């Protein structure tokens, strides 16, 4: 976290510690149920990299040999020794067929024959959803669970402090418990009807102009009345000379609250990732969230520093792909907040949605998953696509260089030499040191 403010830091740290401990305790007992994924017979010189290769409709692409994959670790190209097509479940009711590859033992890394089952955790960010939105999300999750295969494991994790259920194959029982998911979004606002975009822009302008916080209040510098701040003053102040200072104070206060919300959400997800880390095999976390406000401007707030990157790295190390679904109601919220303002005009190029999505895009990409906006409904169709995309993946055996074997986290890049396909792979990898 990049900003510390009085007593709020210990409280947030306590919440973060609580969610981590709770998640570990909740999920730790689930490991014996997880099906084993293919492994390499001679893995001394190889590392395993899971890769999803899908077409534009989200269907897995098979029949790719190791020569089709281009893998680099820390910016250095590494040889792909084998590429095994692993079938996890039928795709749209039809099981994809893996094509055997010629070659010796080094090129036959666990060919898949029967579906191995998948492990899902559905994470619901209750603090970003109102009650109606959370009920819609719970209904979409129930429909998602009903479409799983019998040998798929699935759990539910409502955060920061909602009900949580460890991965299970008892899908019917899990569905019956979804009634405990209740949204708790609290409106962040004030007298001047500032949107997240305006909070970001005003705090960025204040930072550029030298406005700072002090222990006794706000030391607000004189700000050039341009761009967002000038528009807000024209819209809200109606000639009051003291209004400008009040607008800046409100923007900072809202930024602090957004930062607290973002920290709670990100620490909640880190707790989930920590709890899943010891489960073997590939895991998929599906996040349903109303969004996390974050600055997209230099010096703007809210700012949570390196937390999204850390979350993505931790997920990558735990072999967890995160699908982040943004249940975007920002347009309706903005209309509601401004319904009393007859002069309010909606900007069709509004950045508010992008500000809500930024962190979700960052941590889902780093984990090897995907960010998907949901503009209408509760995500039923998107969840069906997640099932389709995760029905199969490739398990690559990549030959590591001795320079990689230092136990440090390194950037991982995977490309495929085919057109009109999408490749999903984690962006970080740790190659363990050799044991003597």
Image (tube, helix red, strand yellow):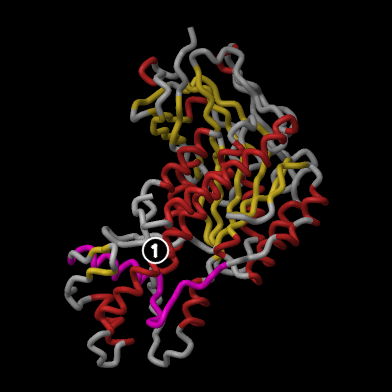
In the image, is residue 248 part of the stretch drawn in magenta? no
Residue 105 percent coordinates (x, y):
60, 12
Q: In which quarter of the image is residue 288?
A: bottom right
Residue 137 percent coordinates (x, y):
66, 62
In the image, is residue 197 part of the stretch drawn in magenta? yes
Residue 89 percent coordinates (x, y):
71, 39
Considering the numbered disc 1 on the image, is that residue within a helix, a strand or a loop?
helix
**Residue tagged by mark 1?**
256
Query: Is residue 90 among what the camera can see?
Result: no
Segment tinted magenta in the rendering: 185-209
Say which residue appears at 63% left-offset and 52% top-offset.
385
Q: In which quarter of the image is residue 98?
A: top right
Say which residue appears at 38% left-offset and 50% top-offset.
1
| 71 lies above or below 45 | below
Say which residue appears at 48% left-offset and 30% top-offset.
68
Say which residue appears at 66% left-offset and 72% top-offset.
132
Question: Please, which residue is most extreme toward the front here?
Answer: 216
| 98 lies above or below 81 | below
| 241 lies above or below 383 | below
Which is more toward the observer, 180 or 285?
Answer: 180
Q: In which quarter of the image is residue 347?
A: bottom left
């Amino acid at each position: 976290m990049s900003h510390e403010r009085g007593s709020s830091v210990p409280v947030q740290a306590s919440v973060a510690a609580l969610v981590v401990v709770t998640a570990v305790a909740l999920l730790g007992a689930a490991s014996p149920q997880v099906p084993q994924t293919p492994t390499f017979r001679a893995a001394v010189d190889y590392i395993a990299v899971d890769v999803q290769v899908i077409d534009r409709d989200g269907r897995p692409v098979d029949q790719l040999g190791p020569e089709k994959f281009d893998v680099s670790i820390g910016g250095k190209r590494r040889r792909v020794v084998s590429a095994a097509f692993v079938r996890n479940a039928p795709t749209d009711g039809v099981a994809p067929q893996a094509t055997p590859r010629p070659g010796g033992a080094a090129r036959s890394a666990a060919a898949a024959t029967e579906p191995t089952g998948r492990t899902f955790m559905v994470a619901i960010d209750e603090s970003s959803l109102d009650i109606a939105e959370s009920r819609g999300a719970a209904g979409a999750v129930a429909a998602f669970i009903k479409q799983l295969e019998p040998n798929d494991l699935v759990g539910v994790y409502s955060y920061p402090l909602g009900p949580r259920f460890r991965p299970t194959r008892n899908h019917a029982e899990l569905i019956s418990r979804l009634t405990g998911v209740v949204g708790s979004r609290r409106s962040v606002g004030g007298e001047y009807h500032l949107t997240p975009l305006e909070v970001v822009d005003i705090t960025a302008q204040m930072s550029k102009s030298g406005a700072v916080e002090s222990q006794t209040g706000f030391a607000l510098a004189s700000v050039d009345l341009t761009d967002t701040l000038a528009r807000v003053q024209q819209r809200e102040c109606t000639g009051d000379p003291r209004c400008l200072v009040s607008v800046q104070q409100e923007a900072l206060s809202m930024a602090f609250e957004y930062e607290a919300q973002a920290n709670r959400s990100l620490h909640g997800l880190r707790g989930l990732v920590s709890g899943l880390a010891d489960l073997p095999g590939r895991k998929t976390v599906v996040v349903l969230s109303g969004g996390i406000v974050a600055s997209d401007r230099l010096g703007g707030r809210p700012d949570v520093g390196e937390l999204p990157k850390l979350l993505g790295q931790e997920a990558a190390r735990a072999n967890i792909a995160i699908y982040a679904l943004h249940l975007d109601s920002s347009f309706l919220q903005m209309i509601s907040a401004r319904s009393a303002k007859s002069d309010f005009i909606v900007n069709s190029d509004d950045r508010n949605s992008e500000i809500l999505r930024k962190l979700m895009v960052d941590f889902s990409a780093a984990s090897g998953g995907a960010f998907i906006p949901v503009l209408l409904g509760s995500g039923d169709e998107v969840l069906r696509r997640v099932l389709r995309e995760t029905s199969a993946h490739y398990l690559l055996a990549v030959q590591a260089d001795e320079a990689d074997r230092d136990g440090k986290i390194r950037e991982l890049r995977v490309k495929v030499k085919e057109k009109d396909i999408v490749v999903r792979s984690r962006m970080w990898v740790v190659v363990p040191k050799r044991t003597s």
